[in-house]
Amino acid sequence: MNPQQIAIALWTLVVKEIKRFTRIWPQTLLPPSITMTMYFIIFGNLIGSRIGQMDGYSYMDFIVPGLIMMSVITNSYSNVASSFFSNKFQRSIEEMMVSPMPNWVILAGFILGGMARGLGVGVIVTLVSLFFTRLEVAHPLLTLGVVILTSALFAIGGFINALLGKKFDDISIVPTFVLTPLTYLGGVFYSISLLPAFWQGASMLNPILYMVNVFRYGFLGVSDIPVGWALAAILGFIVVLFSIALWMLENGKGIRS
Amino acid sequence: MAEPALSIRGLTKVYGNGFHALKGIDLDVPQGDFFALLGPNGAGKSTTLGVVCSLVQKTAGKVSIFGIDIDTDFARAKYHLGVVPQEFNFNQFEKVLDIVMAQAGYYGMSRREALPRAEQLLRDLGLWDKRDGSARMLSGGMKRRLMIARALIHRPKLLILDEPTAGVDIELRRSMWDYMRRINEEEGTTIILTTHYLEEAESLCRHVGIINHGEIIRNTSVRELLAELDTETFLLDLAHPVESAPRVEGFQVKKVDDAQLSVMVHRGQRLNAVFEALGEQGIEVMSMRNRANRLEEMFVSMVEGGQNTEVRA
């Protein structure tokens, strides 16, 4: 395929993915908006007003970046996991496999589709948060860069999960038992400086901590960990996971007999 | 000499569980041919086509599509290939036109180029009025036609149809046959067909390959294959019931029911002799037909008898 044909194929796949999740918006876009509104009301307003300040900011201001990031992570991941697995399940993945579209285009198409939903939900949650707090962004470019990279990283993760999954249960195990706990323990609701030394060290092994903190740094200008380290870690994970996903696709893991 | 549309050499497939689905098959399908790949369930038809379409990974062997080795440039080979699989494999919640247009996009066709082609195909296949509806609202026959439209959107030179008329009523099946004949004869599209309706293969195809237990046991023209038939069985519907099967010298006659007889006729025997003998016994024949499709008789004898069995009906 020449570059123009590749661009058309990629655009086709991305548009198809976006159409898919917007067609079922009550399942994809509405629930995170309602859930996050609840978080803002309960944790931010009701409980947060009794907690006081965290790292020098009101509790509401502190948790908003983490909650936006949590939505982006969950939705980027689950969009690709469920969409690609459904394609496998319905065998509509064969439409792509019989076409001359390179494997990296298929991978990129699903990742971009997942990012579109993750970032779309991120925007919705950000807009909802404006009802509860006055949001200021200390480092706009860094904020944007981190949320895009994080979205890409978890979209790739969702793709690998879908490739490996054999039944629908398999694509809900990771979000339920891995992503959600790591996100809650990734400093969304607290600063790790509040933890004892041992648990601070243990928290440093949680990759989501880095993403949440850099994102929060982009908004508030405060972070528990060095920003450069966090960016390097995110980029490193993206390169490694993208390579693994592409290798699996090239070798037909989970899709070719 | 033109490259074959499809050339397979020594194709072997061993599945993870150790099952030898293909045992080094060789097969050539000439350009412009209408070719039937026949075989009982589990014989290796779908595995063979799966390898050609990149849905199944081969264990060994060479596959070329219009001279392009799929191991060296599968992407280029895929441009020549259109596939209509056995099972519906599109997202049933998408609109009919979107399904066809998305496939065009995967082949790098711009919307401006693809839309007129999609319209022409959907009109030809009687789906244009359904273009904005969800694919799940289509009937089974319409879904099959949608898969044909999708497979043809990029003008492939080789079309693979894996049981395209399964579950389709006879009227629709005939109209699909006409369409397939047309694209084969007028557009020169090479077609490879698998089917369980052997009447379909006999009616449509010029060449036939029979696969059994992962081996090609026959690859010849339909005409040559049928010429080898040395016995046909006819069913005779009688005007009045008979108590037992009449004796007809030189023919094996059996009573099917009170008003129907079956007669085996070997090559060279005159059917008139049967009517004369029955007439002499006061048995009046109202109508007559083949007991089964001729190719079906041949096919059954080959796959039941094995590769070296003499072909007899």
Image (spheres, coloured by chain):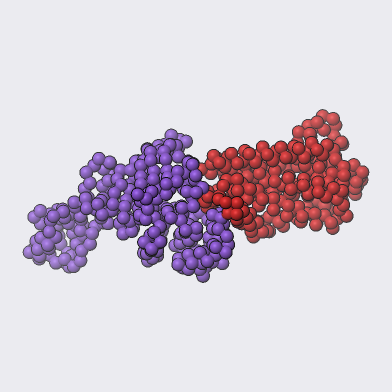
Residue A23, quarter of the rendered image: bottom right
Residue A92 to residue A203: above or below:
below
- Residue B40 lies, in percent from the top left, at 35, 47
Q: Nearer the viewer, residue B245 or B297?
A: B297
The residue furthest front is: B1
- Residue B230 appears in the picture as rendered: yes
Look at 85% across and 50% down and name the residue there: A137
Residue B102, quarter of the rendered image: bottom right
In the picture, which chain is red? Answer: A
The image shows a total of numbered marks equal to 0
Query: In the figure, is residue A37 to the left or right of B141?
Result: right
Look at 10% across and 57% down and name the residue there: B248
Query: In the figure, is residue B112 to the left or right of A117?
Result: left
Look at 81% across and 41% down and name the residue there: A213
Residue B18 to residue A220: above or below:
above
- Residue A203 lies, in percent from the top left, at 79, 34
The residue furthest left is: B280
- Residue B37 appears in the picture as rendered: no
Residue B203, quarter of the rendered image: bottom left
The residue furthest top is: A198
Q: Nearer the viewer, residue B150 or A21?
A: B150
Query: In the figure, is residue A212 to the left or right of B29?
Result: right
Look at 37% across and 50% down and name the residue there: B2
In the picture, which chain is purple? Answer: B
- Residue A5 lies, in percent from the top left, at 58, 54
- Residue A175 lies, in percent from the top left, at 68, 44
